[in-house]
Amino acid sequence: MCGIIGYVGRSQALPVLVQGIRLLSYRGYDSAGVAVHDGTTLRIEKDRGRISDLAPRWDPATLAGSTGIGHTRWATHGAPNRVNAHPQSDAANVVAVVHNGILENDLALREELEKAGVTFRSDTDTEVFAHLFARDGGKDPVAAARELLDRCHGHFALAFVHADHPERIVAVRRGSPLLLGLGVRENLVASDLRALAGRADAVVELGDDQIAIVEADDVRVLDKSGSDVEVVRRPVEEHERETDKAGFAHFMAKEIHEQPERQYELVHGRMDTVRGHARFDDLPLQAADWKRIERVDLVACGTAYHACLYGAYALERLARIPARALMAHEYDARQPRLDDRTLVIAVSQSGETADTKVAVELALREKARTLAVLNVPHSAIGRLVEGVVDMHAGPEVGVASTKAYTGMLTSLLLLALAAAEARGTTNDEARELIAALDAVPDAIRRTLARTEGVVADVVREIYRAGNMLYLGRGPDAATALEGALKMKEISYIHAEGYPAGEMKHGPIALVSFDMPTVAIATAGPWRDRMLGNVREVKARDGLVVLLAAEGDVDAPKVADFVLPVPSLPPLLAPIVNVVPLQVLAYETAKRRGCDIDQPRNLAKTVTVQ
Ligand code: M6R
């Protein structure tokens, strides 16, 4: 969703801000803007549209200066247009502010300000911050920021430039992430590490209800009472610096192809190959704790929720713990019964998803045990939970999640194997999985190589379809849902995923020659039943794309196209089976000319509920 970048230093701010906005673009946005202070005047440029169209219209001579803030907006309050784009300013244009998050008491504060004679120009909640900060921000910026923290409800990351202080950015954080990037004789502010690429060697994570005064040679952090807080620097690690597509046409393609390597690193980082078990010594949950757990709730949204469906399956099957996957945004509505014998596992690529964070907060209030499977351990959810399992997928830029999904599956499987060991339920299936884990990276590599040609043929047949159906059974029911989500997100073809057993209870009514079905029949006791479902589709003139184990001689007899994948135990198969479905969605979207890395209306990180 929205993104913030701020710069104060000795270089021209505008190119840094434009580059920062480019790097933030993957989050999804509809408008962008900058404010630059040249020492005398604070100037703002902003509009609806992409940075590639906007930046050439921003004149470097007019927007000269070494202090500035920039923003990408994903509209929540008010239409995506120039007036509502950020930076927002006060009536006298002495303050420019960029904002991520939601001001919850926006209407009450607006009314109060209007009564005091303020005229609002935009529909945004952000403008309230500009008017409030304008009152004292010139004289005493810390007092002005503290007043905001007192009076404003909701969650927000804010960066201000005040006309009276050309050498300074004031940053305030509650809930929404905000980082300070430390460079050489320059400092930055950003909502996202990615926006700091190439400029910051170390970062400071601003805590909740903290205020930062950022200048070129100095960074000061204060708490809500105005007292100085120790500035804790963290070096930016090598793997956090990745920013390019490595020769691929899109980040999504690059990320799909990174999966073998990411899987290898994840498995080898966690598996004790000598003793043949998964190591989670870094977690607060040890053997005795696992034995006390009576239920596991896995909470997440979107792709991460699909990973939870798989995770619940693995935990219940291997560790014999009742486990369920729940959409995080539905969690509080059911008033779940929680106590210290319940383990709540949040799964999230970004670690910032608002709904998932709220579910974790509920679990903490009810004294449940908490873990999170994350790709960004230093994140809002990471800070809340007792323990973090880092999926080590590396930065994921494409809005459609790919390598993070397979990272989530493998992390959850490893966790389930560790839980099984702790609870004494390790059986032959678990031992077979442990022995076969090493085969996953190569299986993905082989799948990518072998399915490429078939996918091209399939795309020629399906790219004009209006609707698609994805079917799978057992742990591959999650793969079906995930395959369908990938297709709809980036190609805009309406696609639904179902556990295949559900087909006869409704969706079969839709099957016809113009609705292609993708069926997953690679593994386990479900293969025969899946082939039965495929026959039912064929009997109704449906076109079938079948994922089948290499060498399955029946597959070509029942399907129009076969995507062959290496044979693996049923709980490992989903980690590989999803890969050709990612490629199918990618190639279909390409054929349809879609904006693959930034699909319409979607944001990479959904920080509002
Ligand atoms: O960062 P998270 O994993 O918590 O994000 C959850 C969903 O918003 C995300 O998976 C979304 O569904 C992706 N666009 C899927 O490709």
Image (cartoon, helix red, strand yellow):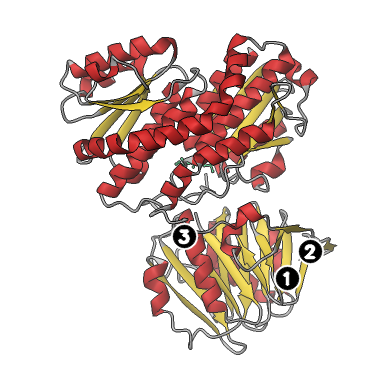
**Amino acid on which the number 2 mark rests in the picture:** Leu
In this picture, is 7 found above or below 111? Answer: below
Spatial CA span between label 1 and label 2: 8 Å
Q: Are marks 1 and 2 in contact (CB under 8 Å)?
A: yes
Spatial CA span between label 2 and label 3: 30 Å
Q: Which residue, given by chain and number where applicable, does mark 3 sit on?
A: 25
Badge 1: how crowded within 10 Å, few (<14), some, or many (20+)?
some
In this picture, is 500 found above or below 485? Answer: above
Mark 1 or mark 3, earlier in chain: 3
Q: Which label was assigned to residue 222?
A: 2
- Name the mark nearer the viewer: 2 or 3: 3
**Left or right of 88 on screen, residue 362:** right
Spatial CA span between label 1 and label 3: 26 Å
Q: Which residue, given by chain and number where applicable, does mark 1 sit on?
A: 213
Regarding residue 345, the answer to whether it shows in the image is yes
Q: Secondary structure at mark 3?
A: helix
| Residue displayed at 45% across by 17% down | 474
**Amino acid on which the number 3 mark rests in the picture:** Ser
